[in-house]
Image (cartoon, rainbow, N blue to C red):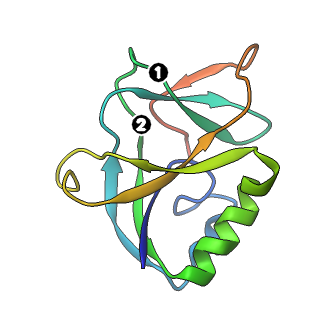
Amino acid sequence: MTLVFVYGTLKRGGSNHGFLMGECFLGHARTVPGYTLYTLDGYPGMVPDASAEGVLGELWSVDAKCLAALDDLEGVSENLYRRAPIQLEAPFATVAAETYLYARPIAGRPHLGPTWPVQ
C-alpha cells in the first residue's frame, strides 16, 4: 500500500474521484509550507514555492493497481506530473506519503493558492 496526498480532481466529489473508489480515505491533510497550486486546464497543478503556506487536500492509502492507474491519469510517463515524496503536517507528519507535482512550466498560469475547490 502507498499513501497518496491528493489536492485536486481526485478529492472526494472531484471529477476524477472514481479512480480512488475502493481505496482507503485516511483524512484531510495539509502539506508543510513550501507548496502552492496553479490553475491549469480545468485542474490544478501543485509546485514547490518556498514562500507558500502549503496545500490542503486528502490522504489516501492505495494499492499497486490504483497507483499505476493514478500514474497514467497524471501523465507521469509524458512528464506532465511527477510522483514525489511529500511531507505533511500533523496528524500525518510522521507518515511517508507521495503526491503528484506539476512538471511543466507554470509561466502565465493563474496562481490559485492553497486549495482547489471541488466542482
Write down the residue under mark 2. 55
> Does residue 33 lie above or below 97 as drawn?
above
Give the crowd class for mark 1: few <14, some 14-19, many >=20 residues within 10 Å: few
Task: Name the one closer to the observer, 45 or 27.
Answer: 45
Where residue 53 appears, x then y in whole percent? 34, 24
**Residue type marked 1:** Asp
Q: Earlier in the sequence, mark 2 or mark 1?
A: 1
Q: Position of residue 64 (x, y in %)?
A: 56, 81
- Secondary structure of residue under mark 1: loop
Q: How many marks?
A: 2
The residue at which mark 1 appears reads as: 49
The label number, if any, that marks residue 20 in the structure image? none
Q: Residue at x 73, y 24 (%)?
A: 105
Question: With respect to residue 24, does 88 lie above or below?
Answer: above
> Residue 46 sits in which quadrant?
top right
Evaluate whether residue 119 shows in this view. no
The answer to whether residue 57 shows anywhere in this view is yes
The N terminus, quarter of image: bottom left
| Residue sitting at x 32%, y 63% | 27
The image position of residue 102, as x and y in percent, is 64, 38
